[in-house]
Image (cartoon, rainbow, N blue to C red):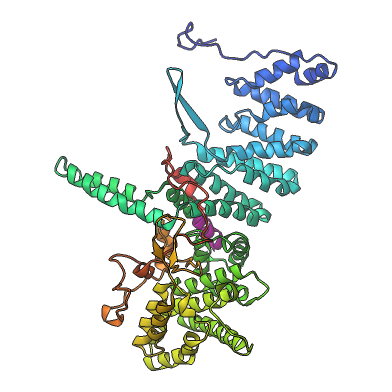
């Protein structure tokens, strides 16, 4: 026998000796009341230095007596499920999967523990670094073998699903319960979401539920990082980078290294919550693209099924969520694949808006989505925009007719006429963004179409929609309609300004006087997309705000002369005062979170097609 060249005295012996009898004998003794070997077996299974040969030997014995492993032996089974099998040799992995298959087939009581064990490996294992007996770091493992480990987990899950077809009934709650806390690093969240989406590839029956779990978590991230917070964080870092560049200029001539470093920094979001959201949105959009395209061509049947699943999640989670900024762009991105999808989405929003049995808050939200989608989606042609405007105006005019024929005094009451006002604002907002596309091909026919909408009746009606719409929308709509002499709004705007009553803000203290400039508590869900990496997919599909010339805008008493330089959203032209307004969705989590210790993506091999 050849002896290895090693330091014999300072090296621990290789464990090849196993204490106690066979598994069958141990179970028999335990049944008779002698638990000494039973406890010894559990102790040896928990040994961190257990060898592959020992694991294989035990697993083979456990398989031979799997019918005896009833609920009475759950602690022993839990010891087996805690074995570190994922990172072991291929022989151990194959034997462990064979054991899992036998176990869930013979003892379905252990189905959920087995599922929980597999799902627990969907995130990188955590590493505690100790120095001098003190924990100085607790970070996510950057193991380069993660792709292989994840592959083995999915193989195990497919094996369990093959043996127990009703696994899907128990899997979704486990996936939801094991979702990492949103303050975890981007890498941890990305790995988990990627693995959840990968599960839907071989268990498609749970795709809608999985999307609901993921989008629910994304919405929590989205509403906890407001648009203002993200913009302020990004603006704050620009002067800091300039100062750093001026300080280090001339020290070394390393242009390529500096530029590469700056590119990697600018690709990350400064706001920690926005960075996590950006990472997860990129994973979700990559999944949508890979699912819908086969060999580079769109598979319409598969795309329709995914659209139905996302639309169901939209109705349940996204539509009722106020002031989400980014998550809804998943559906925006999917609709860009084919015009029929965009038209189906518009039709869905229209049905919600015009349905009086729907809650008013959902009808108003649907109107906001309808107007924002028509205004911002480049892939929607003018003909579709006109068709939607015709539907909206027919609804608005019918509502005005019903109020005029009621014989009652009509007043400007948001609680009674909220859907009407949001429909009007959707029309104004759409015309602001799409009027050029409607007029440029043929100015005469375009003007005839705008006049056929009878906007003057809408503006002049007793319900007075200009009084409750956002001032930025009102003034821009008035400037555009005045330029083309479609309707003159400034007389009504001035009258509304004179009648506006100031409100004393007692909650903030002092005697500050202000007015509520956003009485509809409205927002436009497809306002500019702020996330950097996932935003690269949205940018070519997105209609940015094209600033009007100053000569086209009639100066008003507000004194605003245009939007700020380099701003995309025309709403910055006059920001609504939302402080103190009841109904704004509060942040669910503190937006000033510490940056994660590990920010990044899974290894490049994880970015393969789903």
387 up-or-down from 146: above or below = below
Residue plotted at (56% across, 87% down): 397
Residue plotted at (48% across, 7% down): 8
Tell me how many marks there are.
0
Q: Tell me residue 67's x, y (percent).
A: 81, 31
Q: Residue furthest left?
A: 250
Magenta-colored segment: predominant secondary structure: helix
Residue plotted at (67% across, 14% down): 18
Residue plotted at (45% across, 67% down): 516
Q: Nearer the viewer, residue 599 or 547?
A: 547
Q: Nearer the viewer, residue 562 or 2?
A: 562
503 up-or-down from 264: above or below = below
Q: Residue furthest top?
A: 9
Q: Nearer the viewer, residue 43 or 182?
A: 182
Residue 558 left/right relative to 509: left
Quarter assignment of residue 436:
bottom left
| Residue 532 seen by the camera | no
Q: Is residue 293 magenta?
A: yes
Q: Tell me residue 31's x, y (percent).
A: 84, 19
| Residue 571 seen by the camera | yes
Q: Tell me residue 321's x, y (percent).
A: 56, 60
Span highlighted in magenta in the image: 284-295
Quadrant of the image for the N terminus?
Answer: top right
Q: Tell me residue 9's x, y (percent).
A: 48, 5
């Amino acid at each position: 026998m050849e002896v290895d060249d090693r330091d014999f005295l300072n090296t621990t012996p290789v464990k090849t000796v196993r204490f106690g009898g066979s598994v069958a004998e141990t179970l028999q003794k335990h049944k008779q009341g002698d638990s000494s070997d039973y406890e010894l077996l559990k102790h040896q299974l928990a040994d961190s230095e257990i060898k592959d040969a020992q694991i294989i030997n035990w697993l083979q014995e456990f398989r031979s007596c799997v019918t005896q492993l009833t609920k009475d032996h759950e602690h022993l089974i839990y010891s087996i499920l805690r074995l570190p099998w994922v990172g072991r040799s291929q022989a151990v992995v194959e034997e462990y999967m064979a054991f899992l298959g036998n176990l869930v087939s013979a003892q379905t009581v252990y189905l959920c523990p087995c599922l929980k064990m597999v799902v627990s490996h969907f995130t990188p294992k955590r590493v505690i670094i100790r120095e001098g007996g003190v924990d100085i770091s607790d970070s996510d493992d950057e193991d380069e073998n993660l792709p292989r480990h994840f592959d083995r987990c999915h193989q195990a899950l497919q094996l369990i699903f093959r043996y127990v077809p009703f696994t899907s009934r128990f899997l979704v709650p486990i996936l939801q319960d094991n979702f990492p806390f949103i303050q975890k690093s981007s890498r941890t969240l990305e790995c988990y979401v990627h693995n959840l989406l990968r599960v839907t590839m071989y268990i498609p029956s749970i795709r809608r539920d999985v999307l609901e779990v993921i989008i629910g978590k994304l919405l929590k991230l989205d509403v906890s990082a407001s648009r203002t917070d993200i913009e302020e964080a990004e603006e704050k870092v620009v002067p800091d980078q300039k100062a750093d560049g001026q300080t280090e200029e001339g020290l070394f001539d390393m242009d390529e290294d500096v530029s590469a470093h700056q590119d990697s920094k600018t690709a990350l979001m400064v706001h920690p919550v926005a960075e996590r959201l950006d990472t997860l949105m990129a994973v979700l959009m990559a999944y949508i693209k890979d699912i819908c395209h086969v060999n580079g061509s769109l598979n319409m049947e598969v795309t329709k099924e995914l659209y139905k699943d996302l639309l169901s999640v939209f109705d349940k989670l996204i539509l009722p969520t106020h002031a989400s900024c980014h998550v809804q762009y998943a559906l925006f991105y999917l609709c860009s694949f084919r015009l029929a999808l965009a038209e189906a989405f518009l039709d869905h929003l229209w049905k919600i808006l015009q349905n009086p049995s729907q809650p008013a808050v959902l009808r108003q939200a649907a109107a906001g989505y309808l107007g924002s989608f028509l205004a911002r989606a480049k892939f929607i042609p003018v003909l579709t925009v006109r068709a939607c405007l015709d539907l909206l105006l027919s609804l608005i005019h019918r509502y005005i007719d019903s109020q005029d024929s009621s014989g009652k005094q009509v007043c400007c009451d948001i609680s009674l006429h909220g859907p009407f006002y949001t429909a009007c604002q959707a029309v104004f907002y759409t015309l602001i963004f799409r009027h050029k596309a409607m007029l440029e091909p043929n100015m005469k026919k375009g003007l005839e179409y705008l006049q056929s909408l009878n906007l003057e009746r809408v503006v002049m009606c007793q319900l007075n929609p200009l009084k409750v719409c956002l001032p930025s929308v009102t003034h821009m709509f008035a400037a555009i309609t005045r330029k083309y002499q479609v309707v003159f709004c400034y007389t009504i705007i001035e009258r509304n300004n004179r009648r506006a009553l100031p409100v004393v803000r007692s909650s903030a203290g002092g005697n500050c006087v202000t007015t509520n400039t956003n009485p509809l508590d409205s927002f436009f869900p497809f306002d500019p997309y702020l996330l950097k990496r996932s935003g690269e997919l949205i940018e070519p599909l997105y209609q940015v705000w094209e600033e009007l010339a100053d000569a086209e805008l009639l100066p008003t008493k507000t004194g605003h002369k245009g939007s700020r330089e380099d701003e995309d959203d025309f709403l910055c032209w006059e920001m609504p005062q939302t402080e103190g307004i009841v109904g704004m969705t509060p942040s669910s989590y503190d937006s000033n979170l510490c940056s994660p210790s590990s920010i990044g993506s899974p290894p490049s091999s994880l970015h393969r097609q789903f």
